[in-house]
Image (tube, coloured by chain):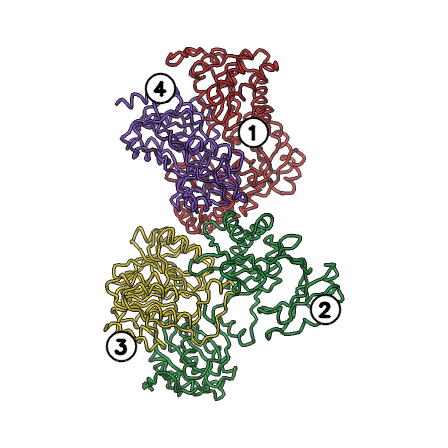
Chain colours: A red, B purple, C yellow, D green
């Protein structure tokens, strides 16, 4: 839920490979990385094709990321244009080349985890092809699934009946829904959507699909590639097992606990500054990891680094040791450091910092105000409660 | 009285011989919690700080009357351990472990519902009734006993608020972390209801975060409460969280943002603090009312 | 009052447009049963003998208040249909279909237990409260109304006994077939308990068979009953049934034979008839007592 | 439960193939149908072998159906002896040739459906290798499994703890129990046993196994062969979809309903006679099927044929038509016929029989007494209540 929480989104072509594995009809096609390959695939498909940029962002169609080609030569040309282009800052390095579908009608079918009912929820509509949140509520059918027993054919019949589809289309939709639920459970998905689920002369086909996996279940699915697109810094901090999200401000933050880190960001913003990142070292990260994380933060060239630790499992002496080590290593190259340190082993931590010549705040308010002032903020907003502990 | 746990609670730890389990066994027992037993399959007969270790939860229940269990086994084993605890009749299961697969969490909650077990977590710091019983990993010294119920989605932020209350000489009846995951057991509403019925609690502090709709559902319930609620929501400045696609928006239906949560809580009658350090004053004014 | 069904029962048939379903719809309605609706997926809007047909059980429940369903779909579809009925809130589900896979039956019974649905069958002739309500496939003319509860594992044999009772001018409050399969819903004990609490019933006839331990469990319960029980057990001369290997013997623990059942029923205080035609005299003497 | 209920027992080698498919360790080996094959398999196994007759009856070992051979030549010789021999009347036409195990200890593991609790029941013991019903109750561990959720590792740990096994053996036992439960559910078994589950230097191995399937689920398992061993007559009547079991008396019986058929047998015995078969034509069998069944019964050369029908779904007129047809076809070749006919369409049925010159009883008592007298019985037992309806 918070910026640090992480889900594994699969590329369209991976989602479709998974759909096919569960018996859900998908268009014939292959993923390619060059214009030559695109021409070959188009040739073997033997008809007009669609070339679809494989990027993990919405609005791909509007951004020109999907093109159509009547023959292999045109496919080659289109592929050459698409490959290497960027969509919302993401470089297109792969295309899915598929038979072009001739769609009579577009349906929607999705499965998601509903936190309120603590179980899977099917969302279906006879009005697919657009973002489902733009479909009026009366055209959306929901059905809860009981994880004890799974999805039943009678539920699927109820869904199709409420959707207003019948006959062969309803039966095929039902089969796809049953398969999609098996996939959802079997693959540990947190979200999967088929949109549009296209009605063609050959029946229903998953024309586009989305599949988002639960990172916490990755150990059960070693075959699923890690599709997280990370910068070098993100890669480095992710490698430490810490939660990191780059943001657009000038104050680098290291805090413990996702909620506390967000609160730190909020307070900075209140003082007219902005966080440069979200970095949560909570949950008992080791001193070495904090040291590495701090050095990495320094490398992002912030105006100031703010360390905000309320020690629980996280021990203040370990935080102080890491801070001193980075401070004394010269890695900060003059970047100012603001520390707020309270909680477990607070006295030991303060002593370590004092020896190193670093002063530490007791109160978050004072620390945030100081950091905000150094990070382009006004340091005057807020309710004016001064921090007098320094 | 506190909610969930009190001085009569007979607590146990699943995974008591693990690094985390053994560390927190010592701290929980040191706090005065009646920590009667623990499990570690294959280690029956061992002891951790004088606390007997068994192979099965059933042994802890039948031999020591354990009724609350803190689950501290690694994430891949949580599913099995949770079902074991529920089948053995544990009344309150506190799943401390983080990174539990969400499909496992759904299964656990369904089974808990079948057997009327209350689940706290996963990914929670636990529950503490200050001075009586601690079943979790929170820094116990920040809690002072008193009339305020505290329920939170996040750990450190709630420690911060508990400490701030304590510095203002305001104590806590029970502090509970509902857990930070998409699927958790007891939610805000369940715990607000418990505090509403708890004679010792006079006011409740709710610490929320952006994302999901738990705070909005809480706001609806607050309308029906007789006791005042003070809320703080983290994430006002955060960029939109990594949303669960458009279908996620369907579930949230426009809720989930800071603005939506704040508006709902205001409308529900909660007093919403702008900053963590504002909470004690708001609570103090509630207690005076 | 009868047990399970009576003149207020709103019955429905799942699979009402099938050969069996349509035939028995006519006979059940003709008997005076309040047969309010039936299902046949994809056939909503049709009628069978004036009885409306729907796609879903939920429609039959919400539109007509159906509370008892006779399930007559082919065996491969029973699992789905039974879950549908239970989820829709049907109170008593009578599974007429035979040859239901036993693993499906286990699932159905577990779900029924979760939702407090009472299941009769599978592989049962159903239940009849003579003169009030018939939910099943039994030959209705053999039943006369009166003070005797009849519960049976087998169909024809119970018709025979009902007819013999009728010829002796002894009537029946309710006759129920528990079903002939390894796993069935309501068992002898459940139904004996219901008859024990039924004001109209003065005496119960239990018709059993060799194999399994249902009659032995019934015998234990009969010890606690105030009403007299007359029993008949078929299979005295049969060779040992095709037993479930040695593990089956572990479950039966020496029970299951004619001799074991007879001894248990004698000890439990039932009056055991040697032949079907002895039942009316034994019942008559019970009713006189 | 009754003689007519039917389960599908698999041969040992089929059970072991299924075990292996679910990851349960079995001895290396192959099924053979000739001495030459046995020699070849023994050669490729490369060590002493066991040759095990594949018959669906217990007591195979005591009857000499299992032999051991130190080398391929001896295996050939042993196979030649075993093949074609009979065990409890069953001809041995297949042998399972396996590596000979050197067993340190024998465990037992079984799964069965418990009708009382309406769910699966695990039965386990550290004293395997003998019939489990001969093991004292205190050495038998039982564990119910919830079909909603399946078998949990914690339950398996509880089982092994109660069995008194630990360490590697307990872990391996646990894995096998989990696999066996998956097999039980996945294959629609009503019973499966591993006995002995042999502890060898290479760990636990399913040295012998039993797997009995639910006939009613056969449509879900088209790959499972029909192993029912039937006589020609059984085959013929099974082909009609009716329940038939041959017995050892002289009175052929056709009745409707399993309970009623058993009751008919009981009454015959009371009168000093015995049934020659169990034949249940209940559940609305068609007239043609009854005609075929009756003709088949006549072909078994009984002393008398007793038809006992209490018509419910079964219509008396259809029974009478079938009876007349067989009677008039000459298929009875003088075999006396005793009919008891009441219930649905009774009058029409009696009229049909009357026209054909067949008299019918009203009461079972009289019919059974007459049939028993013709079938070697005394016709005098019982309580002396005469049947006066004739």
Q: Split into 4 quadrants, where in the image is the N terminus of chain D?
A: bottom left
What residue is shown with label 4?
A: B168
Q: Is residue D156 above or below residue D42?
A: above
Dot 2, how many residues are within 10 Å of its Cα: few (below 14), some (14-19), or many (20+)?
many
Q: How far apart are marks 1 and 2 (CA)?
A: 63 Å
Helix, strand or loop at mark 3: loop
Depth check, mark 3 against mark 4: the one in front is: 4
**Chain letter of the residue carrying label 1:** A
What residue is shown with label 1?
A: A241
D355 vs A262, nearest the viewer: A262
Depth check, mark 4 against mark 1: the one in front is: 4
**Left or right of C99, for residue A48:** right
Q: Distance between the residues labelled 3 and 2?
A: 69 Å
Image mark for residue C168: 3
B158 vs B56, nearest the viewer: B56
Q: Distance between the residues labelled 4 and 1?
A: 37 Å
Q: Distance between the residues labelled 3 and 4?
A: 88 Å
- How many numbered marks does the figure carry? 4
Q: Distance between the residues labelled 1 and 3?
A: 84 Å
């Amino acid at each position: 839920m918070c910026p640090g929480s992480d889900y594994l989104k699969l590329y369209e072509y991976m989602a479709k490979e998974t759909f096919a594995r569960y018996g859900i009809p998908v268009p014939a096609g292959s993923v390619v990385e060059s214009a030559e390959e695109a021409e070959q695939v188009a040739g073997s498909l033997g008809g007009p094709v669609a070339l679809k940029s494989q990027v993990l962002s919405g609005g791909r169609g509007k951004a020109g990321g999907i093109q159509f080609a009547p023959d292999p030569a045109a496919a080659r040309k289109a592929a050459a244009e698409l490959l290497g282009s960027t969509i919302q800052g993401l470089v297109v390095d792969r295309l899915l080349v598929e038979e072009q579908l001739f769609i009579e009608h577009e349906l929607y079918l999705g499965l998601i985890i509903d936190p309120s009912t603590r179980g899977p929820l099917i969302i279906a509509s006879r009005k697919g092809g657009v973002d489902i949140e733009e479909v009026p509520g009366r055209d959306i059918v929901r059905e809860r699934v009981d994880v004890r027993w799974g999805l039943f054919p009678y539920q699927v019949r109820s869904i199709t009946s409420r959707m207003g589809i019948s006959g062969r289309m309803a039966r095929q939709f039902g089969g796809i829904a049953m398969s999609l639920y098996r996939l959802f459970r079997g693959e540990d998905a947190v979200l999967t959507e088929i949109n549009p689920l296209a009605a063609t002369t050959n029946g229903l086909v998953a024309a586009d699909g989305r599949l988002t996996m639960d990172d916490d279940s990755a150990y059960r699915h070693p075959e699923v590639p890690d599709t997280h697109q990370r910068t070098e810094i993100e890669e480095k901090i992710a490698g430490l097992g810490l939660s990191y999200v780059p943001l657009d401000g000038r104050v680098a933050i290291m805090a413990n606990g996702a909620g506390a880190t967000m609160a730190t960001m909020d307070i900075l913003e209140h003082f007219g500054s902005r966080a440069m990142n979200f970095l949560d070292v909570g949950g008992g990260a080791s001193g070495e990891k904090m040291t590495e994380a701090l050095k990495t933060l320094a490398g992002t060239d912030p105006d100031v680094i703010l360390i905000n630790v309320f020690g629980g499992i996280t021990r203040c002496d370990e935080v102080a040791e890491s801070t001193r080590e980075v401070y004394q290593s010269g890695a900060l190259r003059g970047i100012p450091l603001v520390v707020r340190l309270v909680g477990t082993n607070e006295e030991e931590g303060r002593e370590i910092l004092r020896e190193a010549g670093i002063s530490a705040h007791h109160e978050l308010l004072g620390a945030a105000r100081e950091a905000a002032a150094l990070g382009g903020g006004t340091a005057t907003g807020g309710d004016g409660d001064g921090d007098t502990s320094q | 009285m506190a909610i969930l746990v009190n001085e009569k609670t007979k607590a146990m730890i699943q995974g008591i011989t693990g690094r985390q389990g053994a560390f927190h066994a010592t701290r929980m027992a040191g706090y005065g919690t009646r920590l009667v037993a623990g499990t570690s399959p294959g280690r029956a007969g061992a002891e951790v700080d004088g606390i007997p270790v068994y192979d099965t939860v059933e042994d802890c229940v039948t031999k020591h009357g354990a009724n609350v269990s803190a689950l501290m086994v690694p994430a891949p084993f949580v599913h099995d351990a949770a079902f074991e605890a529920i089948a053995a009749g544990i009344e309150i299961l506190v799943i401390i472990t983080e990174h539990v697969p969400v499909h496992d969490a759904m299964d656990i909650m369904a089974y808990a519902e079948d057997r009327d077990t209350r689940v706290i977590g996963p990914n929670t710091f636990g529950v503490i009734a200050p001075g009586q019983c601690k079943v979790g990993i929170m820094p116990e010294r920040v809690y002072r006993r008193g009339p305020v119920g505290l329920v939170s989605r996040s750990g450190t932020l709630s420690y911060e608020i508990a400490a701030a209350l304590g510095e203002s000489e305001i104590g806590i009846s029970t502090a509970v972390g509902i857990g930070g995951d998409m699927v958790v057991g007891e939610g805000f509403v369940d715990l607000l209801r418990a505090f509403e019925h708890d004679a010792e609690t006079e006011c409740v502090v709710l610490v929320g975060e952006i994302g999901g709709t738990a705070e909005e559902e809480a706001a609806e319930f607050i309308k029906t409460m007789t006791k005042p609620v003070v809320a703080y929501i983290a994430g006002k400045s955060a960029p939109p969280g990594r949303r669960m696609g458009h279908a996620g928006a369907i579930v949230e239906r426009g809720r989930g943002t800071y603005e939506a949560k704040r508006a709902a809580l205001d409308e529900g009658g909660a007093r919403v603090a702008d900053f963590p350090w504002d909470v004690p004053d708001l609570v103090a004014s509630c207690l005076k009312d």
